[in-house]
Amino acid sequence: MDIYLIETPVFKIDGGAYFGVVPKTIWSQKYPADENNMCAASCRSLLIKKPGKLILIDNGIGEQQDNANHDSYYVDFSENLIENINKLGYTTDDITDVVLTHLHFDHCGGTTKTDSKTGNQIPVFNNANYYISQQQWDNAINPNYREKTSYHSEKFKFLEETNKLRLVKQNLFLTSCIELRLFHGHTPGLMLPIVKTYTKTLFFAGDLIPAKASIPLAWVSAYDLFPLTSIKEKEQILNEAEQKNWILVFQHDFYNECCDLKMTTRGVRGNNTYKFVDLFKNEA
Ligand SMILES: [Zn+2]
């Protein structure tokens, strides 16, 4: 298995929203903010190459569009998903499976792009099946008032009319070494991968634990619909991850790509941080 962490356009999240009820006097010691109280946030994807399969997990905000949403989140488009896939020697047509952890705009925006001739949105990954949880699909197609601005349906609704949509109803092994596990605190049916490589197990912590600073149980994002559910889910997965020596991979942490964990008297905490590529230096 070859596995890559891919950068896509970065954006900024309001620090208060990022860390929920934690006061700025405390979170600002762990995560910097700019003069507008905005925190830089990555939107990383995972690309996994296995024999006969090239699996992409999430695809970021997508291309630059004339979009007020992009302005309010200060999106910086200098990293480009498609270019970064090409740099690894693959094209978008090589992708066999796209796993979308959920359908918020910063996770599935790269699913379509603008057709230069017609101006319409067209699919980017022409040969891929799409894995989305059934709960998330239902939630996104008929969004609640709180979440509806997070869903840009032109990025995913077309899948309904294809035979490429694979709706996942329960925890699933996509392959023998990629488990997709469901969580419901951030949004119903958030689906996060646990990936076993030759020597390590990685938990792609997505929006359940967006940054190393989000590891303490009460540090729950204000975007989470059900914070008490998030706390329970974080506690369970962090305990499992610590016991099994998993590595956490952060999708949104601008400053840390991955870390291992340690048990302390206050619960599980982040330990050493790593660059993703350094994790696999000694793997064949
Ligand atoms: Zn989200």
Image: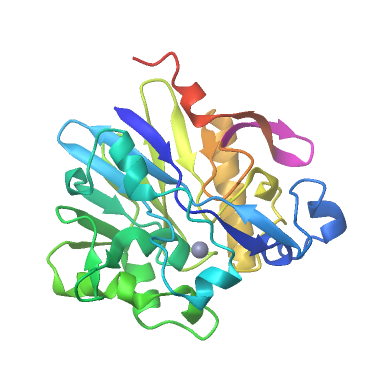
| Residue sitting farthest toward the right | 25
212, above or below 72, in the image: above
| Residue sitting farthest toward the bottom | 145
- Residue situated in front as seen by the camera: 155 or 146: 155
Task: Point out residue 217 in the picture as x, y percentages from the top left corner.
Answer: 69, 52
Residue at horizontal 31 percent and vertical 76 percent from the top: 154
- Residue situated in front as seen by the camera: 151 or 241: 151
Q: Is residue 202 one of those drawn in magenta?
A: no
Task: Point out residue 11 in the picture as x, y percentages from the top left corner.
Answer: 56, 58
Residue at horizontal 41 percent and vertical 70 percent from the top: 65
242, above or below 250, in the image: above
Residue at horizontal 70 percent and vertical 38 percent from the top: 269
Quarter of the figure with the C terminus: top left
Q: Is residue 115 left or right of residue 262?
A: left
Number of numbered labels in the structure image: 0
Magenta segment? 258-268
Quarter residue 110 falls in: bottom left
| Residue sitting farthest toward the left | 163
Task: Point out residue 198 in the picture as x, y percentages from the top left corner.
Answer: 36, 21
Quarter of the figure with the N terminus: top left
Residue 182 seen in render: yes
Please name the colour scheme applied to the rendered image.
rainbow
Residue at horizontal 61 percent and vertical 38 percent from the top: 256
Q: Is residue 49 left or right of residue 222?
A: left
Q: Is residue 266 one of those drawn in magenta?
A: yes
